[in-house]
Image (cartoon, grey):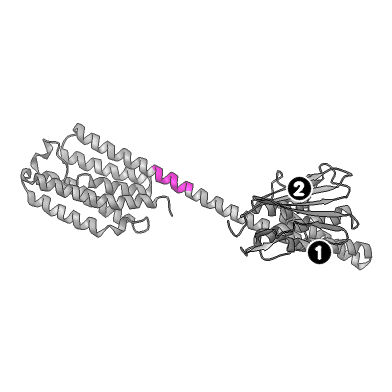
Amino acid sequence: MSVEQPLWRALSAYRPLTMVYAVLLFGFGHERYERPWIAAAFLAFLALWTLATLRRVANTASCTRRFLIADLTVALTGILLTPLADAQVQQVDSPTLPSIWTAGSVLAFAIKGGWRWAGVASSFVAVANLIERGHPSRDTLHNVLLVCVASIAIGYVVEVARASERTLARALEIEAATRERERLARDIHDGVLQVLAMVQRRGTAMGGEAAELGRMAGEQEIALRTLVSGGLVPAARGSAHAGPERPGPDPVDAASCDLRSLLAPYSGSTVTFAEPGAPVLLASGAAGELAAAVGAALDNVRRHAGADARAWILVEEWPEEVIVTVRDDGPGIPEGRLAQAEGEGRLGVALSIRGRLRDLGGTAELVSVPGQGTEVELRVPRGRGRAER
């Protein structure tokens, strides 16, 4: 909903109420009018005009500039007709025929066009009041100044609200685009970049024409990594690189599933899987992303610790969260290597692991000591997941 829509609704209620007030003022004081038929004719027209234009002040689109000018003309006409209906009005500070209904016309200018439009409209009202009175009395100046200040203030607030609304909409668009780019980057990393890296290694090992093909694949891998890493993950977030094919169900499926069934295929001769005796139920989207993060961690073990390195997967279920720990007996990660890898565009840890856990509302902590292996602890709170958010 637009931030200014409540103001239009308030104006739609203000206009008929002030119209009734102006009619009642005339009804209780009609005996003092020298020409009451002029006041009665104008107030009858004012009532019809107010009721007929209720829909025109319902929103910005229907309240056009032509309507605003016509509406202000009605208010100014009522002010200037007041001395004709009541010749004593210039000696006594009596209300004009439209009375406070006039402020509604000025407020419509403020909501529609901001404080500048409000200033112009209130200036016309001030001139009409001075002509109607014949001399600038204290009450007249007080009323004119009140309408002018109130309308300009409301117009300024409307302009600030519109600017804030545009800024918020832009921020939401940027956030949505950034998250989508991060998701695509993870998918690209888990698939295309892995294949290009493998082609480069195999081609270099085979030599000949295959070496040239491997060199080209390496160039494309670097170019794609640069494209993927551009503006996606700040330096404070990033780390390294990884990720196999994502197992499990589609992330948008909100049904619960047993996390153990998604992690069991990772176990093998070099990977030991330790699980609770009871099912570990998570939303399918959260379980799939968590399993993909575990796969990315295991892929890091294979690539950086060697094919013979051993790894252990431990699943722990707690009332508020699920913790999955991946540990290996490799050489560990040298200090500063993760930051260096991110600078080179290798965003496996940043996107395939930490990015996934961040989207799930969880955390990923990596502890590595050179010569003592690496441990990745993945925490996912229960009841959280992309589908539910």
Q: Nearer the viewer, residue 143 or 191?
A: 191
**Residue name at image x 85 percent, y 57 percent:** 302
Q: Percent x, y for residue 286?
A: 66, 58
Query: Is 2 within the magenta?
Result: no
Q: Which residue is mark 2?
A: 239
Q: Percent x, y for residue 258?
A: 69, 62
Tell me how far mark 1 sits from mark 2, CA to CA.
21 Å
Q: Residue furthest bottom?
A: 209
Q: Nearer the viewer, residue 217 or 305?
A: 305
Q: Which residue is mark 1?
A: 195
Residues drawn in magenta: 156-164
Residue 246, can we see it? no
Assign the N terminus to one quadrant of the image: bottom left
Determine whether label 1 and label 2 are within 8 Å by CB: no
Q: Secondary structure at mark 1?
A: helix
**Residue name at image x 93 percent, y 62 percent:** 205
Q: Percent x, y for residue 358?
A: 66, 51
Question: Closer to the N terminus: mark 1 or mark 2?
Answer: 1
Of badges 1 and 2, nearer the viewer stands 2
Is the stretch drawn in magenta largely helix, strand or loop? helix
Residue 385, can we see it? yes
Identify residue type, mark 2. Answer: Ser
Identify residue type, mark 1. Answer: Val
